[in-house]
Image (cartoon, helix red, strand yellow):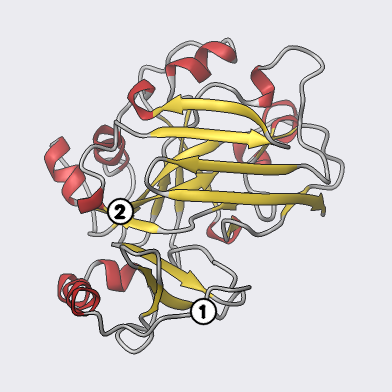
Amino acid sequence: MKLLRVGPAGAERPALLDQDGTLRDLSALVDDIDGSLLADASALDRIRAAAGAGVLPALDATGLRIGPPVGRIGKVVCIGLNYHGHAAETGQATPAEPVVFLKAADTVVGPDDTVLVPRGSLKTDWEVELAIVIGRTARYLETDEEALAHVAGYAVAHDVSEREFQIERGGTWDKGKNCETFNPLGPWLVTADEVPDPQSLGLRLWVNGELKQDGHTSDQIFPVAEVVRYVSRFMTLHPGDVINTGTPAGVAMGQPEPKPYLRPGDVVELEVDGLGRQRQELKSA
C-alpha cells in the first residue's frame, strides 16, 4: 500500500494512493497514519480490505498539499557516510560501524514544502536518502530477518545539511542537521511488502533540472537490515520512528571548488524507485 497524509500542515488527513493512481480518503477508517496504526496489523488489514473492495471515497488531489506520510514521529535516526561512493567523494575512510546521529522530529516537512536556507548559511547541501519507517518496537534485535520484520515501510527522505554548521562550528553534526525544514519526507509510506529488496533501489536528485545524484542502495556500506539491527542495540525504536539510511555520491560538498551549495531560489527534485518524488523550492529563513 501507498499511505499518505494530505491537507494543511498540522491538520493532515490519512489517505491511500490506489493502484490506478486515485487518491482515497481513509479518515472514516483511521485517525492518522502514525505509529499506533503501523503497529496494528488488524487496522492495516482493514485498510487493505477496503481498498480491495473499492469502497474508499476518492479525494480531489487538485491543489491538495501532501504532508509527511507519518504523523507524530518520535525520532529521526540518521546514518552518516553509508555509501561507498559518498565516503570516497568526501575523502573519508569507510566506517567500521554505522555513524549514527539524530534529527529532531520537528525538522520533518512534506515532500513539496518549502525548504528554508538558514540565516548566515553559505553551505546548505542536498542529500537524497531512503527512509525506513519502523512498525514494531525494536530493541536488541539479533538477526537481519528480525530487523526486516520490524520495518513497516519505506519513504523518500531529503536529509538537508548545512556543512559549515555541521563540520566547522565545533561539537557534533547536530547543528548542521536540525535547521527548520531540513527533513522533507514522502510523498508516500510504501509498505514493506511492496519493497521486497530495499537494496535494489535507485536514488536520484536534481538541482535546477541538473542531475546531481544518481545512486543505488546496493552501494550502501551497511544495508537496511543491518542498520535496523545495529541501531536497536543502542536505542529503542518505536512504531513510527524514522531512520534515514545515508546518501549516495554527488552532494555539493564532494564537488570541486567553487562548490555549488544551495541558495534561495534553487529548486531541488528527488526520487527513489517506487517510492515517489519530491520537489522543493528554497527560500531564505
**Which quadrant is the N terminus positioned in?**
bottom left
Could you say which quadrant of the image residue 231 lies in? top left
How far apart marks 1 and 2 lie (CA) works out to 25 Å
The residue that disc 2 covers is 153
Q: Quadrant of residue 162?
A: top right
Q: Residue at x 59, y 15 (%)?
A: 90
Give the residue type at disc 2.
Gly
Q: Is residue 163 left or right of residue 5?
A: right
Q: Secondary structure at mark 1?
A: loop
Image-based side of 175 in relation to 196, left or right:
right
Residue at the (30%, 31%) spot, across then down: 200
Mark 2, Cα crowd under 10 Å, few <14 / some 14-19 / many 20+, is many
Looking at the picture, tell me which residue is in the foreground, 235 or 193: 193
Query: Where's residue 16, x and y in %?
Result: 36, 70
Left or right of 52? Residue 156 is right
User: Front-most of 70 and 23?
Assistant: 23
